Amino acid sequence: MLNKLVEKILSLWNVKKEYRLKVFFLSLTFLFMSATQAIWRPLKNAIFAKTVGALYVPDAKIYSLIFLIPLLLFYSKLVDWLRRHQLLYVFLLFHAIGCLALYAFLIHPVYGLENTSIGVHRFVGWGMYFFMESFAAFMSMSFWSFADSINDPSEGKNYYGLFVAGSKIGSMTTAGILYLATNSISVNQDHIVLPKFLLIGCILLLCAAVSIFFMMKYVPGYHMHGYEAVYQLEKAKEKEAEKEVFSFKNMLKKPFEGLIVMIKNPYVLGIFGLVLFYEITIVIVEYIVQVAADASHESAGSLTAFFASYYFIMNLVGLFITLFGTTPLLRLLGINKTLYVFPIISIGLIIMTILNPSASMLFIDLVALRSLNYALNHPTREILYIPTTKAIKFKAKAWTDAFGGRFSKGIGSFLNIAMRKLAPVSFLMANLFVILGLMGCWLAVIPFLGNKLKKVVDEKKVIGEDVN
């Protein structure tokens, strides 16, 4: 009986032999990509705060929307031109090359970090922020779009937690190294040390591209179909597209196809709602913590060390959640019930913060919300995309995740700007009650998404095939 119990417990993390190679390469790819983000995100926050100023973070989040729209339109065209894995190559190489250009500015004696003046005229800080927002907007979306297209719902339930575990290991490693390297450096070394970590991120992105290359080479094609009903539908669409006559109207419509599909399809709008609720919440909490952190750290190096320690703790907690929460919960409870876990825990955290509105409690909120999102909420939400068309997985997903995430951050930033003139306690309480309202809306959307997913998979149908 004991042996059976142990076998049952171990089965919660078991990977079937035929899927091991695919799971390994996807986990490794996400590890490299997330390791890059764990370096670049602290650098973005610290460099912007110490060149432009932390008070301008809400403004930067709003302006980044303007920067993001042309990238989204270009990405939508790439979806039509390139294969699934090639889209991932483009994302990785674009940001690796962009990183080199940014590095050249950061080491410049006048425009870079050697110049310690702070003000809105410091374009290197703005450029750093917008470039990193582009990376953050497309990073998860590009990886998960690819993963959603080559896994079926059962594989998503069984293995998505393992992909996230890989990302947590990578993020912990690089965030820990960044913390150790920046914790003890003097102010006059910032301009030497910090740009070098930007280059490390560039190398990691190239490693992710190599991982995808080997996966495409060694994983059998029949394991790359994903949800079979979608695979067959897309094959039929490809044949129809070959016969399609060129139309100027269609050429204009294509870049906005993802936005049109999102608006027309209630299921995709529901997923957009989940993105909206989370991003507004995290922007509010993160801004409060970021302003406090900036006030207590004098240099970009010490502030980078603070954010690196935060990302290390966040990913350590996330790894624990992934291994002992996400994978077992998805296999034991299923997707529908697991969708409720994040908003319920979030409501509990916010109520605790209202009762104990301290700096330490807000830091706990930030770590817990980020950890739960990356480790549990995000992979669970991604499974919702598996039985959808390519137009939804790649184009509509770009608008819901990349643009929707930035749009949501813009709303959260508007709230921060509008309420930052309030007394600190009033500002905090007003925002906490806004978050409670968002979590209530979240709970209302979940039943529709869960029931729709179950019905479609049971009937072996595809979401979005009827939207033109």
Image: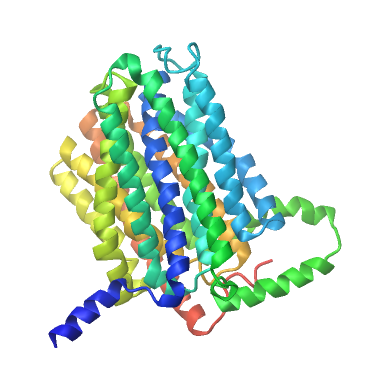
Judge by depth and name the residue closer to the eye, 148 or 414: 148
**Residue 404 located left or right of residue 181:** right
Choose between 134 and 114: the one closer to the eye: 114
Q: Residue at x 39, y 71 (%)?
A: 157
**Quarter of the image with the C terminus in it:** bottom right
Residue 35 image-quadrant placement:
top left
Vertical comparison of 324 with 318: above or below = below
The percent position of residue 261, horizontal first and vertical second, equals 62, 61
Q: Is residue 234 left or right of residue 44?
A: right
| Position of 209 relative to 135 (above/below) | below
Residue 84, given in percent of the width and then of the height, sits at 61, 60
Give me the residue at 56% from left, 34% from top: 98
Residue at horizontal 25 percent and vertical 22 percent from the top: 297
- Relative vertical location of residue 278 with respect to residue 290 in this rendering, above or below: below
Q: Is residue 370 left or right of residue 267?
A: left
From the viewer's side, name the closer residue of 233 and 350.
233
- Residue 24, picture quadrant: bottom left
Q: How is the image coloured?
A: rainbow
Q: Position of residue 456 (x, y in %)?
A: 51, 78
Q: Is residue 390 in view from this perspective?
A: yes
Q: Which quadrant would the N terminus be assigned to in this image? A: bottom left
- Furthest-bottom residue in this view: 1
Q: Who's the residue at 34% across and 41% down the image?
A: 174
- The number of discs equals 0
Q: Is residue 274 above or below residue 465?
A: above
Report the residue that reaches farthest toward the right: 245
Q: Position of residue 271 (x, y in %)?
A: 47, 60
- Quick check: can you spot residue 410? no
Q: Is residue 466 left or right of residue 143?
A: right
